[in-house]
Image (cartoon, rainbow, N blue to C red):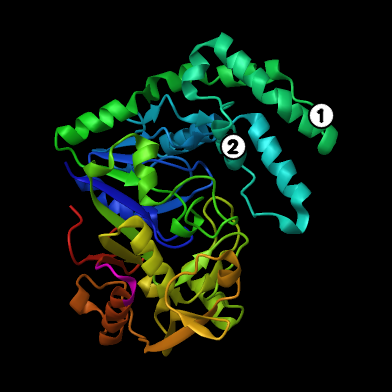
Amino acid sequence: MPALVLLGAQWGDEGKGKATDLLGGSVDYVVRYQGGNNAGHTVVVGDQKYALHLLPSGILTPECTPVIGNGVVVDPSVLFSELNGLGERGVDTSKLLISGNAHIITPYNVTVDKVTERFLGKRKIGTTGRGIGPTYADKINRVGIRIQDLYDESILTQKVEAALDVKNQLLTKLYNRRAIEAGQVVEELLTYADRLKPYVADTTLILNDALDDDKVVLFEGGQGTLLDIDHGTYPFVTSSNPTAGGACTGAGVGPTKISRVIGILKAYTTRVGAGPFPTELFDEDGEALRRIGGERGVTTGRDRRCGWFDAVIARYATRVNGLTDFFLTKLDVLTGWEEIPVCVAYEIDGKRVEELPYSQTDFHHAKPVYENLPGWSEDITKAKTFEDLPKNAQAYVKALEDMSGAPISAIGVGPGRDETIEINSFI
């Protein structure tokens, strides 16, 4: 019953796609369990680069069955655009499964997202404007549209009309926008029904049966721990649970079936969007990390904010996820620095704090306490074993492991699929 959860241990963009793809050949199912097309993965296969937004990374591995779980919100137009793009590049997507309980991002969800964020002005959250938050809000408010609703036009119409009763009041009276016609929305959603049908399944049953048959199932989170709606830097978070517990609710498997939880950890730190970021750099080092690391959001196209590694955040991720392993990515980006600062604690109101403060105010005012580690100048992209790394690079990895609270079992030394050092097998 080998069920693994693979998730971001920082603010997202840690390289989960590469990690998932690395495991793909040994995995029978790869499951996205939360988020939507606000989460992007970049996977490099040979000389080909694939940018995935909604589809699980396992879609690129022929032996693997990719699954979109019930906890994901699905924009059908984005889904088919991605499927079409992969098909044009010769990727077989016929094995994809989508939970009939997954919620649909409707056109009015996208509209509400954009106008609300614009209305907030300086108080905006920094959403992607893709309707993710409003769709999760509809789900909680019990006016959401699920994929299975596409196959009963009467129910679909009733649900769309109910959702628009309130939204049209907001759009017309508060935001000075036109009302949205329910019939047009229903008509558009129904155009997706036939094409979606071959993919729709009872994925909870399929995944539990697979685990009972000793298949290997990998649960893949989008975003990262610090963007979790409950455990992240609220309110500058996403609208779902990328943490390990979200895998159970978002895929419909019990927690006793999870055997390993792998946190993806970048060798430095980045985030996209607004919110506190203690180690953020505004100098030449920050610009160098952004340039060398190619730090631009896969989904948003926005430049990522860059900073030094934050061990306080890594320890927090270990705690709230119950991490058993880390996959350290982008170690090669740090090549060339004479010294590399690492945040080992915070200073808050003159006091040293070694754990993430639960208070939003305290975290906002946290100042990083740095320890400088010696850097290296040697090219590490051809390293195949840990011993191939320069001594200072080895020492850096070991220091991060000691500070973070879980073993580092794999290291990314370049963007390619084969540019990874595997120290301990995940399976």
| Residue 46 shows up from this direction | no
Distance (Cα) linking label 2 and label 1: 21 Å
Question: Considering the numbered disc 1 on the image, is that residue within a helix, a strand or a loop?
Answer: loop
The tag on residue 178 is: 1
- Secondary structure predominantly adopted by residues drawn in magenta: loop
Give the amino acid type for the residue marked by disc 2 in the picture: Ala
- Horizontally, residue 281 falls left or right of residue 69, namely right
370 to 291, vertically: above or below: below
Residue drawn where x is 21% and y is 70% of the image: 384
* N-term mark: 2 or 1: 2
| Chain part drawn in magenta | 403-407
Label 1 neighbour load within 10 Å: few <14, some 14-19, many 20+: few
The tag on residue 278 is: none
Front residue of this view, candidates 224 and 413: 224
Front residue of this view, candidates 120 and 221: 120
x, y (%) of residue 376?
A: 35, 86
Name the residue carrying label 2.
Answer: 137
Residue drawn where x is 39% and y is 38% of the image: 250
